[in-house]
Image (cartoon, rainbow, N blue to C red):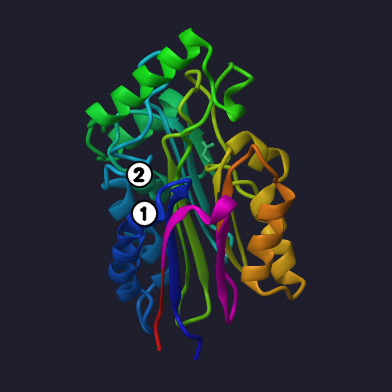
Amino acid sequence: MTRPAILAHGGAGAPNEDSDGPLAACEHAATFLVDGQPDGALRAVIEAAVILENDERFNAGTGANYRLDGSLQMDAILATSDGRIGSVAAIERVRNPIRVARLVIDSPHVMLCGDGATQFAHTRGIADDPPLTDKARKRMEAALERLKSGEVRPTEQKWRGKDMHGTIGAVARAADGTFAVSCSTGGTSMMLRGRVGDSPIFGAGVMCGPAGAVCATGDGEEIIRRLASMRVYMRIEQGDHPQAACEAVVKEIPAPYTVGFIAVSKDAHGMSATADKMARGAKELT
Ligand code: GLY
């Protein structure tokens, strides 16, 4: 029998001291991975993501970043090793975008975005409940100040501006040998309304297939350019240990970019981030 495992992260750059969040998410979600639980891997990564979306310390759901125009739009995705994908981009006024991604899996589509995604959520019974927080509003105000003063960070030069990314995510291997991945984000600290990052894009923000599951976090534009999760996955498929695969792709994306990956394969798992900074957790069942 396969040994179930789940890994979760609270975003590349999120302090390692906040790892109690992803660890608690893994502890709770692992209960779905034991033998006999229908769709255990998918349920586990959803439950892990909901816990992290509800934790204000992390940039997803409650705690998600505001856009520079003061609006709040979020991205999320779910994928399974049997080929199901559900994704939402630039969705508004929902507390748990990952639950909307789950509804998309059962729709005829793979991805919904903007007003259409928000309307879909509300008509399918998800509450109209914008997860605005004072902390995220203050982050946006600080970003606007940096823009005005010109004192931008190295990765903010194009705005000049974007930094405080952060994302949450989980990868799981269930007792039946299936895999799933979840990912949810409020994007970066400086974003135009309508900007979509890597997180809801299959192959970029996440990858899942018969060889395992991968979730990325960090500078979204750079992760998209490099199809980074696909790169980690292909290394695993070719026989690399997930730890070596994550470390190799982190190295391929040099400073000033910040990235991180968590990954599970049939019999191992791994996680790595720029400067080793990423709130993270893992739980393997015997
Ligand atoms: N990785 C999150 C984002 O760039 O949107």
Task: Tell which tag, 1 or 2, sits nearer the viewer.
Answer: 2
Instruction: Note whether residue 215 is visible.
Output: no
Between 76 and 68, which is closer to the camera in this rendering?
A: 68
Q: Residues within 10 Å of mark 2 (few under 14, many from 20)?
A: many
Q: Secondary structure at mark 1?
A: helix
Q: Label 2: which residue?
A: 58
Q: 163 above or below 78?
A: above
Of the residues shown, which amino acid type is indicated by label 2?
Answer: Phe
Q: Residues within 10 Å of mark 1 (few under 14, many from 20)?
A: many
Q: Is residue 278 highlighted in magenta?
A: yes
N-terminal of the pair, mark 1 or mark 2, is: 1
Q: 84 above or below 156?
A: below
The picture places residue 5, in percent across and down from the top left corner, at 45, 76
Q: Which residues are magenta?
A: 262-281
Residue 56 sits in which quadrant?
A: top left
Of the residues shown, which amino acid type is indicated by label 1?
Answer: Ala
Q: Residue at x 52, y 69 (%)?
A: 179
Report whether 241 appears left or right of 107: right
Q: Residue at x 27, y 47 (%)?
A: 55
Residue 131 sits in which quadrant?
A: top left
The picture places residue 170, in percent across and down from the top left corner, at 45, 59
The picture places residue 274, in percent across and down from the top left corner, at 59, 51
Report whether 118 appears left or right of 218: left
- As drawn, which residue projects farthest toward the right? 238
Q: Which mark is residue 156?
A: none
Residue 157 sits in which quadrant?
A: top right
Q: Residue at x 72, y 44 (%)?
A: 226
Q: Label 1: which residue?
A: 49
Q: Secondary structure at mark 2?
A: loop
The alpha-carbon separation of the residues under discs 1 and 2 comes to 11 Å
